[in-house]
Image (cartoon, coloured by chain):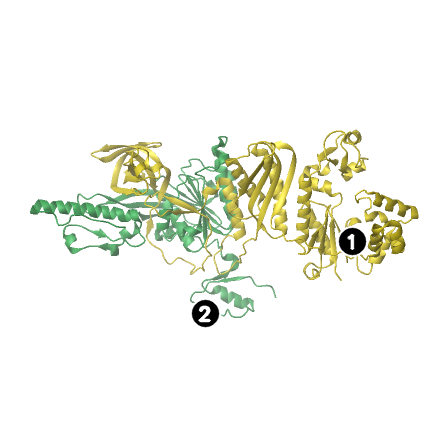
């Protein structure tokens, strides 16, 4: 009998006859029809792309393909880093390893951690501080770019990475055809999804997907009429500019929030006494960052201060609220 | 009955030099203690010997026969390294290895048939592994050390069965005992001449002589020769102790003054070390470099290898990076590299888990990346436990083991994304025009736009407890370890970008330290 292919079985809720050895091709076929069962070599299936966990984007592109180059382009503050970080976060949460080639040195671990990324699974490679050899002056831009691509190819050659993000920063010129081809071949050999992040398209025809991002508006809000504004986030739009594996020309809109918790109504706590005065307090959940809490508390302190001033003006007495001590 | 293999490298001093300088492989080569024209040659390569150059000639005489003869200083360091490499090649086959002299290594083959098949295949494997460490060796296998050595001296691969050892010794010419290769003392010359005068040309003829009679005429060495000829040598294998440090050393004929040519010399040394480690199933850990300098001083440097690997180029890059920070002050004349071996990390792939990089390949990749972009630029970047928003720390990349895939799709999808900040490192100094205390226009390198919307300021004041004297200085707080006092703003500019800007209250300067994207 011919040797059966190895089976990778992922059956959370299915009772399957797995105790004994699989005896026949029929049983193998039956197993393969079960949901969650696929052949070992299909663990990195090209049809099952990497999703980012953001519904509008997943519905738009259905995930980025493994073994292919995908591009996310857009000007500054268009949300391209947000989407790339969502893919990296989702991939790391699934237990896969992510490589992040950070050409401009813009990687911010705080916001990536806030997006739920498992930073222990993200290998950061940067060119921000050049090694001594590269500081000697004769290294030109082209050679630096070659180094960045070399780093990406090393990650792909190592194998086993679920996703490799290459952040080209504000690079204005596309990669040469040979460089793009090398990258595409390396991605194909390793079965790793490659995500190129740039202001413009960089990989030309070798990119399987180009997602073009743009900012619709930046959202600022206030608690009260004269209260200081808070920056809530941005409404962004993603459009599929190129897609070899599906439809293109589609668009989707989504909101990218500075503090996701603040957009959840359940976290908005209102005290009746303060509510009458138009004061809303956003609670600080445990996983919120200090700066978010500090913004909220600063807004609260400002509002309390204005209440105290109003009180003094109305009653002519010393205000009841003298000070606010925030500990975080 | 014990089975012993002997690995023999003919013309070992020459082989050791060729191993250290592979370019000399096809060149007629000779060794001498000095390079003056009147110095005598102590060893010559087969190619030079074929043209009529022999040990004992002066360099001038030899060059009159072969004008292009390469004469190199005899290098004890190269010979020691070559012997170690040969012993490593043997130890990759059997744990019981005795290191002899002049390119001779014995190993016990007991119990290896099940692992490696017949003795012929073991001999072929030994020959291959000797070639892997850069030497052409002859292999002899027999029941004791001396017969195995004699079999190896016949050249090629020769396996002598226990039954046919007598026939082999009978047939063997007396020259193969290597009397001429012994230190040229009066007694060996006398024995050689006497045996020739007696008409004894083969070991069989010597074996048939009476040991007592030979003892009275030729002394103790004569009796020993008869024992060898009869296959009665009781010499036992004395195994060497396991190697704790792998060493490669080289003595140069010239001094190296700059770092770049040093790389060309050190790369083959590292490659040879890696090959030896690979044969033993080990990887290279930390390295100790020792250089002998032209001013007779020593220079030592320890190079820590974060990710043990057998990638010679990555190791060289680490060495170069280390030397560039503090280079030797004089020309380098001798090089010695000691490598601490490490066992490679074992891992087994689980088909129920998502794919992950193989640990050894990941380590090599990290080492290569560290060589390419600097060790401070590769790893896991984390936010530091600090009130400074820009504070990050770099950790060694060690991903935890993958956990099983819970479902084929993602259960936790959401409609809102977490907005990212692109860090600007170091913060970009900008000029901010204020109107009634609020930012109105921002101008800086590649930046110049009107403020459309803003949020803030959010005061951050911290680390005042660390350094009081620095807090009072007019230095930039972001460049010191002292306190920081900043007012942060989020500014949406007319160029479409949303920036995180702060005003450093210590210096009244403005900086952009992040771009929302």
Mark 1 chain: B
Which of B367/B494 is in front? B367
Please name whichever residue, B505 or A140, is drawn nearer the observer in this view of the structure. B505
Q: Can residue B107 be seen in this snapshot?
A: yes
Tag 1 near tag 2, CB within 8 Å? no
| Residue B158 percent coordinates (x, y) | 78, 53
Q: Position of residue B235 (x, y in %)?
A: 76, 56
Please state if A258 lies on the left or on the right of A105 as rendered. left
* Residue that appears at 46% across and 41% down: A203
Q: Secondary structure at mark 2?
A: loop
| Alpha carbon distance from label 1 to label 2 | 68 Å
Question: Looking at the rendered structure, which numbered label has been put on residue A15?
Answer: 2
In the rendered image, which quarter is residue A172 located in?
Answer: top left
Question: In terms of depth relative to the viewer, which is nearer, B332 or A93?
Answer: B332
Residue A241 visible here: no
Give the letter of the green chain.
A
- State the SS at label 1: helix
Give the total number of marks visible in the rendering.
2
Up the image or down, B352 lies above or below B190; here it is: below
Across and down, in percent, residue A299 comes to 22, 46
Q: On residue B146, which mark appears?
A: 1
Which chain is assigned yellow?
Answer: B
Q: Residue furthest right?
A: B198
Residue B102 rendering spot, x and y as whole percentages:
73, 45
Pick the quarter of the image with the N terminus of chain B: bottom right
**Which labelled disc corresponds to residue A176?**
none
Task: Chain letter for mark 2, please.
Answer: A
Q: Quadrant of the C terminus of chain B?
A: top left
A13 left or right of A325? right
């Amino acid at each position: 009998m011919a040797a059966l292919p190895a089976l990778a079985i992922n059956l959370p809720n299915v009772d399957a006859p797995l105790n004994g050895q699989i005896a026949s091709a029929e049983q193998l076929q039956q197993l393969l029809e079960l949901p969650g069962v696929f052949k070992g070599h299909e663990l990195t299936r090209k049809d099952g792309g990497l999703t980012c966990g953001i519904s509008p984007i997943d519905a738009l592109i259905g995930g980025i393909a493994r073994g292919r180059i995908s591009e996310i382009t857009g000007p500054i503050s268009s949300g391209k880093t947000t989407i790339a970080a969502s893919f990296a976060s989702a991939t790391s949460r699934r237990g896969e390893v992510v490589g992040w080639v950070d050409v401009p040195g813009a990687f911010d671990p705080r916001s990536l951690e806030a997006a739920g990324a498992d930073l222990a699974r993200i290998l950061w490679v940067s060119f921000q501080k050049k090694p001594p050899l590269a500081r000697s002056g004769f290294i030109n831009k082209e050679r630096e770019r070659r180094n960045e691509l070399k780093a990406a190819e090393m990650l792909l050659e190592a194998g086993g990475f679920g996703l490799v993000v290459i952040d080209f920063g504000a690079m204005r010129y596309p990669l040469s055809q040979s460089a793009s081809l090398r990258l595409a071949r390396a991605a194909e050999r390793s079965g790793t999804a490659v995500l190129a992040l740039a202001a413009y398209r960089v990989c030309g025809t070798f990119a399987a997907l180009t997602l073009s991002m743009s900012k619709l508006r930046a959202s600022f809000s206030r608690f009260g009429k004269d209260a200081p504004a808070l920056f809530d986030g941005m409404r962004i739009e993603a459009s599929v500019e190129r897609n070899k594996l599906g439809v293109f020309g589609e668009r989707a809109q989504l909101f990218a929030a500075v503090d996701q918790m603040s957009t959840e109504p359940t976290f908005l706590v209102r005290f009746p006494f303060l509510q009458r005065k138009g004061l809303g307090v956003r609670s600080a959940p445990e996983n919120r960052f200090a700066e978010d809490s500090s913004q909220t508390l600063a807004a609260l302190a400002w509002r309390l201060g204005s209440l105290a001033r109003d009180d003094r003006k109305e009653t002519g007495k010393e205000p009841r609220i003298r000070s606010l001590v925030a500990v975080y | 009955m014990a089975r012993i293999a002997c690995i023999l490298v003919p013309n070992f001093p020459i082989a050791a030099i060729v191993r250290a300088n592979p370019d000399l492989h096809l060149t007629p080569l000779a060794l001498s203690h000095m390079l003056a024209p009147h110095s005598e040659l102590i060893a010559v390569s087969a190619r030079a010997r074929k043209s009529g150059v022999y040990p004992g000639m002066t360099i001038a005489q030899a060059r009159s026969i072969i004008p292009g003869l390469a004469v190199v200083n005899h290098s004890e360091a190269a010979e020691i390294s070559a012997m170690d490499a040969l012993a490593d090649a043997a130890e990759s086959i059997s744990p019981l290895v005795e290191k002899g002299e002049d390119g001779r290594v014995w190993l016990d083959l007991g119990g290896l048939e099940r692992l490696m098949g017949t003795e012929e295949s073991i001999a072929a494997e030994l020959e291959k592994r000797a070639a892997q460490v850069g030497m052409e060796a002859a292999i002899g296998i027999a029941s004791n050390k001396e017969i195995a050595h004699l079999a190896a001296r016949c050249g090629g691969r020769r396996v002598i069965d226990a039954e046919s050892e007598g026939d082999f010794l009978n047939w063997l010419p007396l020259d193969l005992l290597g009397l001429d290769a012994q230190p040229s003392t009066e007694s060996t010359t006398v024995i050689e001449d006497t045996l020739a005068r007696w008409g004894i040309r083969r070991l069989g003829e010597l074996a048939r002589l009476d040991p007592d009679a030979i003892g009275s005429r030729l002394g103790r060495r004569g009796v020993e020769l008869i024992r060898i000829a009869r296959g009665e040598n009781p010499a036992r294998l004395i195994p060497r102790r396991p190697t704790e440090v792998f060493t490669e050393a080289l003595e140069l004929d010239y001094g190296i003054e700059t770092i770049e040519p040093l790389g060309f010399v050190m790369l083959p040394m590292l490659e040879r070390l890696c090959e030896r480690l690979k044969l033993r199933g080990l990887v290279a850990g930390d390295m100790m470099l020792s250089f002998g300098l032209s001013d007779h001083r020593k220079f030592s440097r320890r190079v820590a290898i974060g990710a043990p690997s057998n990638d010679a180029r990555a190791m060289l890059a680490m060495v170069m990076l280390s030397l560039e920070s503090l280079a030797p002050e004089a020309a380098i004349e001798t090089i010695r590299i000691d490598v601490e071996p490490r066992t490679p990390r074992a891992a087994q792939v689980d088909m129920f888990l998502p794919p992950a990089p193989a640990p050894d390949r990941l380590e090599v990749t990290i080492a290569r990346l560290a060589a390419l972009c600097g060790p401070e630029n590769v790893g896991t970047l984390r936010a530091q436990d600090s009130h400074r928003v820009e504070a990050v720390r770099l950790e060694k990349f060690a991903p935890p083991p993958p956990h099983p895939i819970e479902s084929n799709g993602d259960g936790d999808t959401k409609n809102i994304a977490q907005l990212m900040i692109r860090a600007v490192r170091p913060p970009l100094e900008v000029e901010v025009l204020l109107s009634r205390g609020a930012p109105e226009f921002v101008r800086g390198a590649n930046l110049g736009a009107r403020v459309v919307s803003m949020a803030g300021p959010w005061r951050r004041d911290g680390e005042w407890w660390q350094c009081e004297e620095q807090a009072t200085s007019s230095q930039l707080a972001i460049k010191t370890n002292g306190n920081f006092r900043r007012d942060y703003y989020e500014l949406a500019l007319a160029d479409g970008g949303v920036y995180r800007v702060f005003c450093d209250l210590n210096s009244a300067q403005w900086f952009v330290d992040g771009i929302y994207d």
